[in-house]
Image (spheres, rainbow, N blue to C red):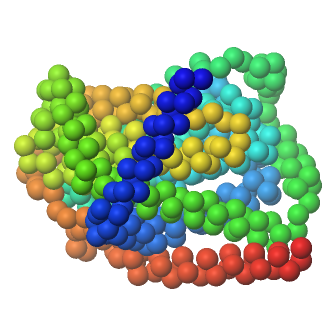
Amino acid sequence: MVLSKLKTVFLSVSVSILAASLISFPRESFEASIRGLNMWWEIVFPSLLPFFIISEMLIGFGVVKFIGVLLEPLMRPLFKVPGVGGFVWAMGMASGQPAGAKFSARLRQEGHLSQIEAERLVSFTNSSNPLFIFSAVAVGFFNNPKIGLLLAAAHYLGNICVGIIMRFYGKETPEESLVDRKKFKIRNALSVLHQTRIKDNRPIGKLLGDAVNSSIQTLLMIGGFIILFSVINKLLYQLHITAILAKTIELGLSSLSLPDMLSVPFISGLFEITMGSQLISQVQDATLLQKAIVASFVLAFSGFSIQAQVASILAQTDIRFKPFFIARILQGIFAALFALLLWKPLYVRFNRNEQPSNALPVGYFGDGTWANDFYHKMVEVGPLITILSLFIYILILLSRLKKS
């Protein structure tokens, strides 16, 4: 009872301070909001929307269940989750965070996963996509495409290690034991595909409309969190709270033989990975290895911004957030260790004649590179895709309101 009251007081005071800060720093808050909005408007929405819509349709048509039956012999012994987890894992890596949570929650709602299986799955299927790691972080922030391979390897190997550890989370149900003894064949997978499609008797138009509706609602929620945490991160800096927290972090960094100058970028990365990665790349008093280690932890931890998005998605189901949060800490530790262990074999050995370069501003991907072309295409076309998608979403809502 006392703990509950303290929590109420803490939350009330925090929100009050946030409101007062918005009034005290209107210009900084506005600039941070614009930055978050531009990120969502130009990049996040148009890049995630196709994955969300297609995944919803794949689930409705039974393709996910078909893939799950085929991947059961791999996913069950390795991660102790059904074969459909392979689909979530692949889509999560391809589209980036928080897609893994979105798909895990969707499969839980469909009954393809038990609560424990969903909590295991969501713990290792949320990761940064390769485009963000190679283009934005490696080329855009570090101005060093070669470091992308190290960051990506550390990130995804950390994911796998977390998945293997989380297989021991929870107790095995009788249904899991029964599934492990079955033998799966193509014929069984095709049968499951057909049965799943028959059970979902929605017409294609209705299925497509539901997919668009659900996907855009999720992306609107994600956009709100991106803008909110962009503002919070800026206000914490203005209130010197980031500097105060950095003093504590400096002790931990010193014990790990890392420079104190990485403390403020590390704090920023704990809240929002994009700004944190940028600030880490700009630290002059740290070696490239030290910056890669800290950046790997930040990328794996995902930041409170993405974790809040995941928590909001999981709140629609009975999937608990605590295992996901613990998994983020574990992945951060694993990713930092892999960055250290793989430094020589993946970076030094292949780049002995390369000279390290200084970081460049956000958005610079190197003239004439595919990453530069993709970035500018997204900036040009992304807002149009966003506007068109929102227009279609409004039409779907209006048509459903008329029918009701």
Position of 351 with respect to 119 (left or right) is left
Q: Please tell me which residue lies in front, 39 or 374.
A: 39
Q: Please tell me which residue lies in front, 256 or 22.
A: 22
Q: Is residue 42 above or below residue 223?
A: below
Position of 94 with respect to 34 (left or right) is right
**Quadrant of the frame with the C terminus:** bottom right
Residue 21 shows in the view: yes
Residue 289 shows in the view: no
Q: Residue 262 location in percent, x, y?
A: 18, 41
Q: Residue 308 location in percent, x, y?
A: 51, 46
**Quadrant of the frame with the N terminus:** top right
Q: Which residue: 52% across, 67% down?
A: 45
Q: Which residue: 65% across, 39% down?
A: 85
Q: Residue 364 location in percent, x, y?
A: 24, 68
Q: Please tell me which residue lies in front, 286 or 63.
A: 286
Q: Residue 401 location in percent, x, y?
A: 82, 76
In which quadrant of the rendered view does residue 403 lie? bottom right
Position of 194 with respect to 396 (left or right) is right
Q: Which residue: 48% across, 37% down?
A: 9
